[in-house]
Amino acid sequence: MQYGFKDEEVSLGPGDTLYFDGLAAHSVRNPTEQPARLFKVYLLRPTE
């Protein structure tokens, strides 16, 4: 999997993790022909 951010791209392999501010513009893609699984966890900020 590859996560794209404004100025960089991060490659992830099996078992890798990535933590970032989800409010930042980002994209995710699978650059291979192989199936991939992605598990996301969202931590929401409390609002007033």
Image (cartoon, rainbow, N blue to C red):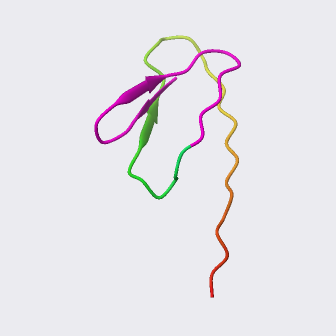
Q: Position of residue 8 (x, y in %)?
A: 33, 31
Q: What residue span does the magenta drawing correspond to?
A: 1-19
**Residue 16 versus residue 8 in the image, above or below:** above
- Does the magenta run of residues contain 15? yes
Is 10 located above or below residue 22 in the figure? above
For the point 38% across and 51% down, the residue is 25
In the figure, residue 39 lies in which quadrant? top right
Judging depth in this view, the residue of 27 and 17 nearest the camera is 17
Residue depicted at x 42% and y 40%: 27
Please provide percent x and percent y for residue 28.
46, 35
Judged by its main secondary structure, the magenta piece is loop
Q: Residue at x 60, y 40 (%)?
A: 19
| Left or right of 47 on screen, residue 24 | left
Task: Give the camera-side residue of 9 and 31.
Answer: 9
Give the side of residue 15 with respect to residue 21, left or right. Answer: right
Q: Residue furthest bottom?
A: 48
Q: Quadrant of the C terminus?
A: bottom right
* 24 to 14, vertically: above or below: below
Q: Is residue 16 in the magenta section?
A: yes
Q: Position of residue 35 (x, y in %)?
A: 60, 17
Asked whether 18 or 30 is in front, the reply is: 18
